[in-house]
Image (cartoon, helix red, strand yellow):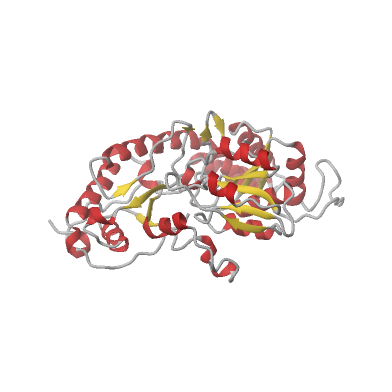
Amino acid sequence: MELAINGGTPVRTRPFTPWPQYGRPEEEALLSVLHSRAWGGYHPAVKELEQSFAQFHEAPHAVSCANGTVALETALRAVGVGPGDEVIVPPFTFVASATAILLAGGVPVFADIDPATFNLSVAAAEAAITPRTRAIVAVHFGGRPAELDAFQALARKHGLALVEDAAHAHGARWMGKPVGVWGDAGSFSFQEFKLMTAGEGGMIVTTSNEIADRCWAYCNQGRRRGAGWFEHYTLGTNYRLSGFQAAVLCAQLRRLPEQTRTRAANAAYLRERLRQVPGLRVPEDDPRIENQPHYLTTFWYDAEAFGGQPRGAVLAALQAEGIPFKPSYPHPLYRNPVFGEAYARLNLPVSERACREGVWLGQSPLLGERSDIDDVVEALDKVRRMAGTLPVREVVAGGA
């Protein structure tokens, strides 16, 4: 037997379940909007989506918008973040979690993650609070909810707003309660790779009438619901979702529960199989989590199990075997050029390590059959056993 990267036969040659998934419901929804000639953000499908999404997350309000980045920006503005306000955020996440703070006029304050979850550490967040702190952004990375009861208590203790970045976590629940409604507002993404998608799109959920009205006004040129088209009461912009997107997302939302069950069952099977194959350590299950959607499954890479081979060499070999493992982010957010020299001296050790040693697997292998998981584990074991023959190379980080 020879590794595929060295010319051998790959474990898997057929693709995993393709994403996005669609069918007649999405096709018919698109045609319905097309034939209505009401293609913009005031098509009835927009209201239907908002009501259905709110109900799904047990929230009284949901406000749709153009994408997940502006959903988070709008939520931050609505909870009162403005110029000079500090907002605590983890650095192991997509850049929008922090740049949305800048777009709202705030200042990102990066706090380290918990190595057991890859989510923001409650202790690190509390240590980062200053008199200038206005809010905390709790990111549910990979679909795993942050410790929401603890963050809720922390925010209340210090008089801070809590905003949930739930871009990866549609339908997830913590201690029996959906994500998105633990804080003052929660933001979701419908970007092409996300758990439900129309290519782009976003949503804000909240239990507050006032915050919902602020979000709607900001996304609708400062109007008020029910007021005239040319009546503008506050500063706003056009962040509306289109009728086409909303119609597709209504169909996507109906698919989500079954997809979540499939991913959860396959994730549990993967966790069970990995107990016999060292090399990638997955965070432990948490009984407080329900309906974890497993947008990403994130692992710690154990170089010792692969004979000391660098992560990049092992991931390149796994990809050659037909398994789409990816390295995590190349560096914490504060190393990105967009932040200039503002965080040049910052070094958060767990986040730095997660970027060096983190590995993730996207949702596609979890949307298929158990045999797909068997291929993942077989390839991992094959590469581990033959790690001494690996060429050294790096692979590019995957999108999240």
Tell me: 30 left or right of 133: left
Q: Nearer the viewer, residue 79 or 199?
A: 79
Left or right of residue 60, residue 28 in this image: left
For the point 41% across and 57% down, the residue is: 353
Snapshot quadrant of residue 258: top left
Quarter of the image where the N terminus is located: bottom left
Residue at left 54%, top 44%? 122
Q: Position of residue 20 (x, y in %)?
A: 46, 48
- The furthest residue to the left: 1
Whole-percent x and y of residue 224? 82, 45
Asked if 386 appears above or below 178 in the picture, the reply is below
- Asked whether residue 205 appears in the rendered view, the answer is no
Residue 22 locus on image (x, y percent): 47, 44
Q: Is residue 50 left or right of residue 28?
A: right
**In the depicted view, which residue is nearer to us: 88 or 49?**
88
Snapshot quadrant of residue 283: top left
Residue at the image point whose x is 80% and y is 51% from the top: 222
